[in-house]
Image (cartoon, grey):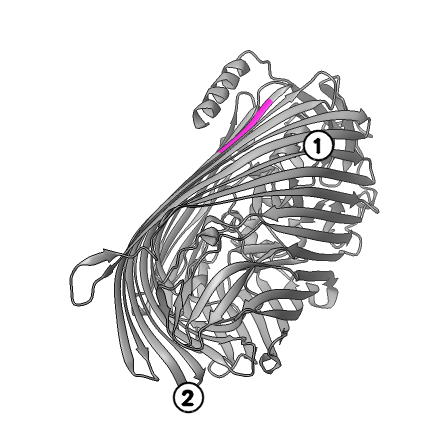
Amino acid sequence: MLKNTFLLLGFLLILSSNSIAQSISGRVVDKNTKETLPGAYVFIKSEFNETIASTFTDGNGVFSFKKPTINTFNIEVTFVGYTKFTKKIERLENNNLGDIEISEDGELLETFEIKAQILTGEVKGDTVAFNANAFKTRPQANADELIRKMPGVVMRGGTIEVQGEVVGRVLVDGEPFFGDNPAMAMANLPVEIIDKIEFLDQRSDQAVLTGFDDGNTIKTINIITKKEVKSGMFGRLSGGYGTDNNYIGSGALNFFNGTRRTTVLGLTNNINQQNFSSDDLSGAFGEEGGQAGGGGRGGNPLQTWERPGITVTNALGVNFSDKFDEGKAKFTGSYFFNDNRNTLNRISSRTYILPSDSLQLYDQETNNISNSRRHRLDMRLDYDITDRHAIIWRPRFNYQERDYINTTVAQNLFDRQNPINEIVNTTSGSSNWFSFDNDFTYRYKFAKPGRVLSTSATTRLNSSDRESRLTSVNRDFSTNQIDSLIQNTIFNSNNFNYRVRFDYNEPISEKSQLRLQYSIGNDIGRTEQDVRQREAESMNFQLDSTLSNTFENTYLQQRSGIGYRFNNEKFRIFTSVDYEVSNLDSDRIFPGFENTQRTFKNIIPRAVINFNASEKTNIRLDYRTRTDAPSIRQLQEVIDNRNPIQIFSGNADLVQEYEHRLFARLRKIDTESSRSFFMFVSGSTRNNYLGNSTLVAARDTLIDGEVLLRQGGQFNKPVNLDGYWDARTYMSFGFPLSALKSNINISTRVNYSNRPGLINDQLNINKNFAVGPGVGISSNISERVDFNLSTEGSFNTIRSSIQTSLNNNFYTQNTRLDLYWQFLGGLFISSNMNHMVFQGLGDGFDRTIMLMNADIGYRFGAKEQLEAKLTIFDLLNQNTAISRDVTDVFIQDQRTNVLTRFVMLSVTYNLRSFGGKNRAE
């Protein structure tokens, strides 16, 4: 498959050598005087208002673009002091647009000075755009500090949320920047180069190539840079050393030369900063507040996971992008290397929800030391070979190796005074993991406008190996009996997945299209687990056939369907109906052969409606269904006893899950008053929900007649259950507060989940309700005085259907203040404070915590590019990390080790060099 992909790519590249690049051009002039306007911004945008390309006029007011591959697009021109010009282009026949005349803004024609509030932003379809100049930040700030001030934007660790939706991609002038790592991209763009920031729902590659909006989007930030910084060099070099031998060194250099952009990053530290970020020393803080919910499929797959505990990190990164072949081809690529040493100390307290008034508690203390090294390579090529042929090729490579040693002390208890048993585990081992993903999309446009044929091929290859040794000692308090176990495990897993898809689009009117689609894919996996236990009073190891396993699985899925799209100035509608057939074929090869085959047939409907109610308001409705097959691990009926009092096994009887999800969103921005309102509501139900069945042993029990589970131990396996549903809503209202020269944002979240689970074969329904009001104030005073104040609470209720004594209410609140004040030239002080409240979590977890960092420093030079500062971390010595996890069968509280108080002296140099030869050009 890979070979054929390269051959096809080579053929298309040869074909492109005979193609002739086409471009469109024009000139921007003053409507009254007819004088040309050098330096005017010119944008090409899709009919969905996505920025496809941007440039600015030269000294003669002339601009030029490569001709877009789509038939319908918008030309937008902006220039300071002039009204915005927008024109819709349909089926462009003449590549020269001639003179574009724009008029001076009437409000600026007066000879006297007018002081007015800068317009905050605007809504255009799915895109919300904010003017960077409407938000004041401290000197040398980066893009992530800017977007924190914008309505509805929340940053949680390495995740960026916009109006409650997680951001998955960052573009700069419409081009990818740092692949799918938004936090890294935002941390390496200084505010002074930014003109506008757009929040948009970017279409899938298939939709971009074909022009057929299929409703699949990814939340994206597009940063529009100022015209004078299209070429130059900028970045930051920083180093610091403190008490307890704490240190950090980091560097980020960006080289922009028109379309060619190169970024080089470096990082080394022992203060828990695991990724490149804007604040080199922020990693000293622990988790910001508790969390409720848990279970389910949370998390952002597009972000690098940060390990809890304390981590020593060495990292290197390179990002490159450029256009070639007269702008028809765009290439982006990035490489990152991380070397981490992590130390984790965690205390967990878990309460099981039993079908009686009795309690079952589980306490665990974990100490883990691990070393890991990871390489990531990500590339993307967009190539418009001719007006009719285009491709997108995206290969990605990951390799990681890890070695570790883990010690766990755990107890099962009837209550706090009566333990049942105790286990002490020591596990050491090593593992490596490899993956190669390859996506290729090809599009052919027929002579008839709107008639398009496209195909895409996707492959995923994953391989992992693990070797480990377990030494376990188990004590039974009722009999005072002690058991021991020593076992060696070798585990290997290989998985290959491919998917091929064909789409044919046919116009049926000027504003509507029909799509026929067919796809086929297969997920092929094999796992082998070899477990050997040491014989009693012997040094010999014997194969344990109960714990060993060889398993093969294929999941072949075919889908065909029809879709319809309608689009005008007010409405964009997409609807489709697909028929899906999935065949599951599983073979247990060892111990003993057993085959399982199942066929699933489903109707998969989809409907998306976008309604532009006005220039200020956009509404989106999205209904979708999907199926989810059980993983190969969930299907294997082999026991995992790495924790002998908490063992796990798969379930060969699992069937696929079927989900219905409905999403509705409203956006509104009044540019005159700078008021904004965002709201969304979503909910889902799942048939055959992939939940859990937990057996809490009332006495010593043999699992599968072979593995002993001591009294109080838990045996877990996945099962299909009905009755799962969830709902959530988010609202945000932002407006300027003139008296404080600030912007205020008021928001609230409401979440509800109804999660079924089996406990000792009895159905339990956990109902979890959470309300999270919040308010934030961000200053707009000046670059010398900057503050951000926010608070967010979370009221949570938990209700269990089989044991009302475990009904629980708890409350968490996180209040944060960031303050910066520069005075007496370059002298400044700054501080960030987190006040966290935890109530209702139980003894040892209920507390109030104040985390505070304080800085005093000085900025040197006329441009204040050199900075020296002294920082005290965790000034009050109260740092801690607490979280709550609620699942279908238990409620768990955790406390994890974090860094505590230390002092550090650091020096930072901010490099800013724009213009020169490139600026003159």
Cα–Cα gap, marks 1 and 2: 65 Å
x and y percent of residue 555 in the render?
52, 41
Front-most of residues 536 and 257? 536
Labelled disc at residue 212:
1
Judged from this view, the residue extending furthest toward the bottom is: 417
x and y percent of residue 643 in the render?
36, 66
Q: In the rendered structure, which segment of residues is drawn in magenta?
A: 390-394
Characterize the local packing of mark 1: few (<14), some (14-19) or many (20 or more) Cα atoms within 10 angstroms.
many
Q: What residue is drawn where x is 27% and y is 73%?
A: 483
Q: Does 575 sit left or right of 326 as displayed?
A: right
Q: Quadrant of residue 292?
A: bottom right
Write down the residue under mark 2.
Answer: 417
Mark 1 is on which residue type? Phe
Tag 2's secondary structure?
Answer: loop
Disc on the earlier residue, 1 or 2: 1
Q: What residue is drawn where x is 42% and y is 88%?
A: 417
Q: Does 242 sit left or right of 47 as displayed?
A: left
Q: What residue is drawn where x is 65% and y is 28%?
A: 503
Q: Does 179 sit left or right of 792 as displayed?
A: left
Tag 1's secondary structure?
Answer: loop
Task: Indicate yes or no whether the magenta region holds residue 780.
Answer: no
Front-most of residues 820 and 765? 765
